[in-house]
Amino acid sequence: MRKIHQGWRERNHEGEIREVMGVREKAGWRIQSRLKGEEEWTRHERPEQHDVEQLIHRLELKYRRSKGSLKEVEAARQLLRIARPTKTG
């Protein structure tokens, strides 16, 4: 199975650019992130709910444009079971 990547950038509370990437492998989706300029990606075993919701949203848009599959969306929704609530403030 080929790896599928879905990435995006956003600003964190400190104004730094944070790069986030969802990677689908045989076992399912995983989320990793890094601050812009960092070399290494941080792999999140238990990603934040916000990141999982962003991944699902982006995959749903791809599905609506016939660029992705419903199977990808459903696999990403499974991450919501283990996601930790997003910190606010």
Image (cartoon, rainbow, N blue to C red):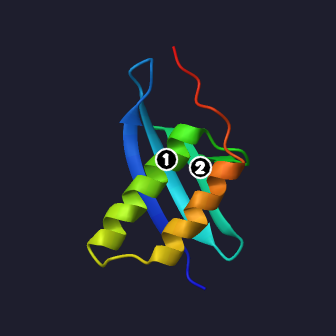
Task: Tell me what residue is drawn at x 46 percent, y 75 percent.
Answer: 70
Q: Is residue 35 above or below residue 1?
A: above
Quadrant for residue 58, please give it.
Answer: bottom left
Earlier along the polypeptide chain: callout 1 or callout 2?
Answer: 2
Q: Residue furthest bottom?
A: 1
Q: Mark 1 and mark 2: span between their CA atoms?
A: 14 Å
Q: Is residue 41 above or below residue 6?
A: above
Residue 22 % position (x, y): 53, 57
From the image, which quarter does the N terminus lie in?
bottom right
Q: Residues within 10 Å of mark 1 (few under 14, many from 20)?
A: some
Residue 13 % position (x, y): 45, 19
Q: Which amino acid type corresponds to the residue marked 2 in the rendered image?
A: Gln
Task: Tell me what residue is drawn at x 49 percent, y 47 percent.
Answer: 53
Task: Tell me what residue is drawn at x 47 percent, y 54 percent.
Answer: 55
In this rendering, would 14 be left or right of 75?
left
Task: Name the foreground residue: 74 vs 52.
Answer: 74
Which residue carries the number 1 mark?
53
Which residue carries the number 2 mark?
32
Disc 1 secondary structure class: helix
Task: Name the foreground residue: 80 vs 89.
Answer: 80
In this rendering, would 32 be left or right of 19?
right
